[in-house]
Each structure stands twice: as structure tokens, then as C-alpha cells.
Amino acid sequence: MEEYKVLAMNFGSTSTKVAVYEGDTCLLQQVFHHSPKDLEGVSSMEENAALRKPLILSYLAQQGVNMEEFDAIVGRGGLVRPLLGGTYAVNERMLEDLRNCTYGTHVCNLGGILAAEIGAEIGRPAYVVDPPVIDEMSELAKLSGCPDFPRRPRFHALNQKAIAKRYAAEYGLNYEALRLIVTHMGGGVTVGVHLNGRVVDVNNGLEGEGAYTAERPGTIAVLDVLRAAFSGKYGTTFQELREFFTFHCGLAAYAGTNDGREVSRRIKEGDKQAELAYRGMAYQIAKEIGAAGAVLQGKVDAILLTGGFAYDSMLMGWIKESVDYLAPVYIYPGEDEMLSLAQGAIRVLKGQEEVLEY
């Protein structure tokens, strides 16, 4: 039986990932890393598109890929209005929100924008799958204590769902019947409570809720944030303060680097400050997992640890020894996002899943 062929794209703050899939088989995959020099003066969606789109098209041409052979183009979804999980057609309403950054500014907005552009050029449909703003949270979970500031899900929805489904498939289980805690640890850290196929509670990792990360501070007392904002020490504008709290906290502040590999190396060389910083990150992540266990009333089928930091056995060991009382712990280093993007588009092309409208 003929398999559908899909071009998948995933845009991160310092990377561009592109892959070609035929069914579940990855034919080509490439990651372009963007240095600070590459990104100098690049901030808007238009500037990012001008940098990244030619890289993708040039790479595909060099590999001899015939663009007309694609059945669909799919991108990692951007910051759009809260949605349920699934595969969405990229329409004009979505494009307007992505281009104008109506619901937030992040380079992942390019997923839908460039999928639509390339799709239009070759006459193929464009999709996004499980955007990072998936909202399946329970009514209780959205209460923050202040009605004007409800808790919002901004998390690694695509990879969390992909890893949860992968775990279920590996053990012959039904994802929609499981009680899981899935923790993604990359540039941000998000801990999701997966109950019967829905993420009913998760921290807003994009905006600093939860454990501290490689560069972000995690949850800070409100009055401390207010004092910082009015002190002038960290900037006098929203953008300056956002820059500080997004890129200059967490491991970067405690250890002087946001690179977990560097921190791990220094620990092995006897650097006590680096060890304190890394143990602190593990401690906070474990606390978030413990809190997620309370949401499931302690009835947890499995705890899944994933993302780039899951490659570090030292960090994983510290977290595991703190939470394995709650449920068995399974480690899935890296992410399955590219395959998940392709599979989401292919399910729609095959008629196995209904395409959703924004």
C-alpha cells in the first residue's frame, strides 16, 4: 500500500529541524543550529522566516527531493488561542494570529506560517499538530487564586503526548485509559498530568511557572517579582524584564552556564557550586512531579521523563530516587516531535482522524 509523504518542520529558538517521512519511516532529517551571531538582529517572524526558509529549501534541493511528491506540509504549532489536542488545518485566521503574535511571541509560530507558505507553493495542505497551547486542563486546575490571572497551559504538548502514546504502545496499553505524569526537560521544564488521554493539569513552563530550568527561574514569590520590576536593577521596560527572567536565571545564574553537559562535567571535576545548582534543579522537578501525583490521588501508572536533559544519567538518578515511590519511572531521552508531526498529518490524510478547524 502506498504511503503518504510528508515534510515536517520544527522551529526552536536556536535550531531549525526538518524531516521527510514516508509513513512512519524517516527518509531524511537535518538539524540546523543557529549561533548568537546568526541570530543577531533577527527578532520578528518575518526576519526568522527569511533566515530559516531558504535553509530548508536549499537542504531539500541538495538532497534531490522533489517537492511535488509531498502530500502535506506540517509544522510544530505556534502560540495560538487555547485548543484541544489534535491536527489542525492552517487557515487564514490562524495565520493572522501567528504572524501578529496575538497570543505570544515565539519562533515556533513559524511552524504554521512556513507550512502554509510552502504548501501553497506546491498546492498541498498545511497542518499543525498538538500546539504548545493545548488546553485540556480541568476547571479546578485553572484556578490561581486571582480571577484575573487564571493558570494557563503553555507546555511541550507535542512531545508529552508523543512520549505518553509511545509508552502505551510499547507496553500494549491504551493511552486513553492511563494515569501518567510526563515531564519534559529541555530549555523549559513542564510536568503534565495525563488522565485518560487528556492533560488535565500542567505548569506554564513557557512563562516561568514550575521548577527552575536552564535559563528560567521557575515560580518566584509575587512580591519579589514586583520589587524587581520597580527596582530598575533588571531593566525598566517589559521587554528588558522579560529578557532577564527568560534567559538569565536558573542554571545560567547559579552555575554560569545553561549547558547541562558543562554542569555535569564540572560536577565530576569537584565543582560544588555546579553540583548545588544541578541538585537544586532536580529537587524542584521532583517536587513538581510529587504535586502532580496528588492530582491523581497517588494512583499513578507511570512517570515518564523526557527531553534533552533526560540524556543526563546523573540528573535522572537524582529525580528518580525522589519520585519512584509514587510509580515506576521510565526515561525517554530526547523527543519524538518530528515523527509525531508526520503521524498527525498522515492520520488526517488517511481519514483515521478528522482534521480540526481553528
Image: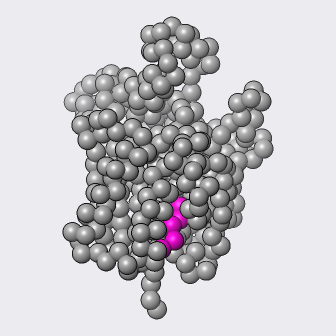
Q: Position of residue 47 (x, y in %)?
A: 37, 44
Task: Please name whichever residue, 194 or 86, is drawn nearer the observer in this view of the structure.
Answer: 86
| Total number of numbered discs in the rendering | 0
Q: Tell me the residue at 65%/59% (across/down).
A: 358
Q: Looking at this view, name the residue that lies furthest to the bottom.
A: 1
Q: Position of residue 159 (x, y in %)?
A: 50, 56
Residue 322 position, x and y percent, is: 52, 39
Vertical order, 292 against 197 (above or below): above
Which secondary structure class fits the magenta region best?
strand
Residue 323, quarter of the rendered image: top right
Q: Is residue 340 above or below residue 98?
A: below
Left or right of 309? Residue 137 is: right
Of 176 and 87, nearer the camera is 87
Image: magenta residue range: 124-128
Task: Please indicate whether residue 52 sits to the left or right of residue 229 in the image.
Answer: left
User: Residue 112, relative to residue 208: is it above or below?
Assistant: below
Please, which colouring scheme is shown?
one colour
Q: Is residue 180 visible?
A: no
- Tell which residue pokes out farthest to the top in this image: 231
Q: Tell me if 319 is positioned left or right of 35 in this view.
A: right
Q: Position of residue 216 (x, y in %)?
A: 46, 30
On the question of residue 49 being in view, the answer is yes
Which residue appears at 42% of the width and 40% of the height?
44
Image: 273 above or below 215: above
Q: Residue at x 75, y 35 (%)?
A: 143
118 within the magenta span? no
Q: Residue at x 54, y 14 (%)?
A: 229
